[in-house]
Amino acid sequence: MNDGQKKTTPKKDVKRNKTTKAWMMEHVTDSYVQQAKAGGWRSRAVFKLKEIDEKDRLLKPGMTVVDLGAAPGSWCQYASKRIQPGGRMVAIDLMKMEPVAGVTFIQGDFREDEPLQKLESLLDGQLVDLVLSDMAPNMSGIEMVDQTRVMYLAELTLEFARQHLKPDGDMLVKVFQGPDFMKYRQAIRGVFGVTHMRKPAASRGRSAEIFLLARKKLG
């Protein structure tokens, strides 16, 4: 029923709309987004991996690579080309991912047993050269909650690497700087001989994300 009063939008909805519009404007004008579209890449995230690869010579022909949290697939696009000839790539994500040539994809939640078992079954006991993880949970907007969720995924990645990486193998994992960061970095040092922190130019400045590159897995 119309009581003659003008309807108003709740303040929280106004704030949300402003935030969404600001994000959309930033996204549309982002040079990495534009470069990704021009180059046929599925997301701007490809430039994070590309920069680290070019700096650290991460990917080589003939490698076996696992990509955790692969969708929409730009890391797979890039890495699958870099490991040829003779390379093999297996990827997993909760979200659907359109096929990428040379990549075997599993749709499922890496945190659950069944998809993880499918991944391990595909590997069939083969140890891998490199584990990639750009995994991130759905963000709540609550900093402490989001940091905890991201670090949990990072811990699962480390455990997977511990079990499935070859001696001298490498791991690249996204983490958030926060209360558990140093503890996690210390855990990595118990598994790998060398650890580097990387903040690619394509990582937005305000983002707390950073990539840990762990090299030379201890035998």
Image (spheres, rainbow, N blue to C red):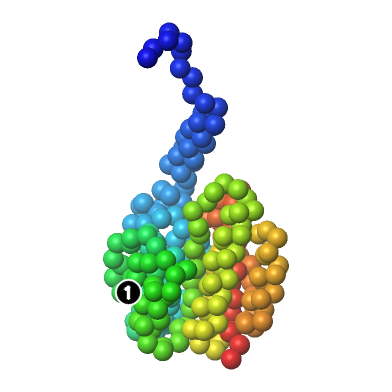
> How many neighbours does mark 1 have within 10 angstroms: few (below 14), some (14-19), or many (20 or more)?
some
Residue 8 visible in image: yes
Left or right? Give the position of 75 relative to 144.
Answer: left
Location of residue 102 by image quarter: bottom left
- Residue 99 at x, y = what percent? 28, 66
Look at 69% across and 74% down and name the residue there.
Answer: 186
The part of the image, by quadrant, that contains residue 63 is: bottom left
Is residue 78 visible in the rendered image? The answer is no
- Vertical arrangement, residue 99 with respect to residue 33, above or below: below
- Can you name the residue that lies furthest to the top here? 4
Element on which disc 1 rests? strand
As drawn, 10 above or below 96: above
Question: Which quadrant of the rendered structure holds the C terminus?
Answer: bottom right
Position of 147 relative to 168 (above/below): above
Name the residue located 46 percent from the left edge and 51 percent from the top edge.
32
Identify the residue at horizontal 35%, vertical 66% (top origin): 107
Residue 97 appears at what percent x and percent y? 33, 62
Q: Which residue is mark 1?
A: 104
Q: Looking at the picture, tell me which residue is in the foreground, 172 or 96.
A: 96
Q: Residue 189: name its quadrant.
A: bottom right
Q: Amino acid at mark 1?
A: Thr
Residue 77, position as x, y percentages in the image: 36, 66
